Amino acid sequence: DHILTEKDFVKQDTLKYPFEERGLQFGDGIYEVIRVYNGNYYLIDEHIDRLYRSASAVKIDVPYKKEEMYERLDELLKKNGIDGDAKVYLQITRGSAPRDHAFPDQTQANLYAYVKDLPRPYSFLRDGVSAITQEDVRWDWCYIKSLNLLPNVLAKQTAKEQGCYEAILHKNGEVTECSSSNVYFVRQGKVYTHPAKKNILHGCVRMRVEAFCESENIDFIEEAFRVEDLAYADELFLSSSTSEIMPILEVDGQTIGDGLPGDVTRKLQKCYESDAH
Ligand code: PDD
């Protein structure tokens, strides 16, 4: 129950947020979700780099220098006695100030990071999941991991109400990513995914998927696929820090490929396994 803040560690139940807080009022902040396996961070460099990139894109000063951030995040795991599988949620907002859309003259960014146990989603990894498609109504700068997640929240809720794990988002039929993961289309042994442009989040696991494809001699093609293409997919899978590499076997009630996790997905899952453990 030790939480890291912009100043120091505090006990969870002593953490207080002012009501005029820009994260709360404007979603004026950024975040990261970092995976921990056996008490060790996975892809920590990728997450920390992205955190500073997001912060600079929205002109927020991160309260800690990079080296200090590494140390503090290690301390967070130690203080909480984490030795198993977990996730760290870290957010930084522009700070607290009387409500005004424009930035206050002087703000101290508010940071907090906490760690929570998180078992791996074994049965979904093995058996696959289903998804729905939804129009991507988000803004153009989804490469920033911003706290503004209302479109993602609504898309995920719609998926949940239909008994599905994820919502695959598309702009005019062109698939971008999912509500909280990246998505990949496999056809004739090649992996297709939306290019890492400004309109998708550049997933840390996505970076590894690209590397795994290279080491396995699988073509990794950064070319957007379309919702209509799903009818011709041999395989479909998603990736994120919490979902890892997960087969998608059904979309909008239609079976993908032969309805079983495919060879390419299985191969990439194996790569993930040895990379993360
Ligand atoms: N989500 N795309 C979106 C919109 C995401 O929110 C996420 C991560 C990803 C995958 O990124 P990564 O591989 O770095 O986890 C892609 C986190 C897990 C979340 O919001 O909980």
Image (cartoon, helix red, strand yellow):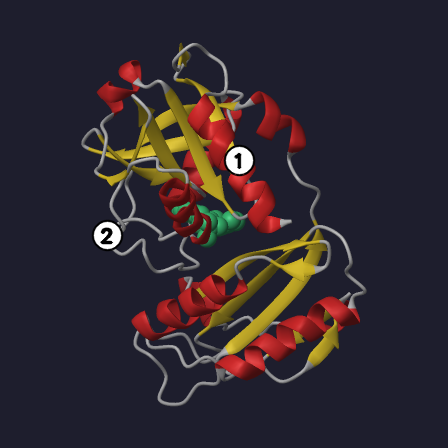
Eye-nearest disc, 2 or 1: 1
Quadrant for residue 146, please give it.
Answer: bottom left
The residue closer to the viewer here, 273 or 133, is 273
Count residues near mark 1 (Cα–Cα under 10 Å), then give few for <14, some for 14-19, many for 20+: many
Q: Is residue 108 above or below residue 250?
A: below
For image coordinates 54% across by 82% down, the residue present is 67
Q: Is residue 233 above or below residue 118?
A: above
For image coordinates 43% across by 9% down, the residue present is 258
Q: Position of residue 91 (x, y in %)?
A: 52, 66
Quadrant for residue 238, please give it.
Answer: top left
Q: Position of residue 118 (x, y in %)?
A: 69, 47
Kind of residue at badge 1: Gln
Q: Is residue 131 above or below residue 95?
A: above
Count residues near mark 2 (Cα–Cα under 10 Å), then give few for <14, some for 14-19, many for 20+: some
Give left or right: position of 24 versus 225: right
Q: Which residue is mark 2?
A: 197
Counting every numbered tag in the picture gives 2
Q: Position of residue 198 (x, y in %)?
A: 24, 55
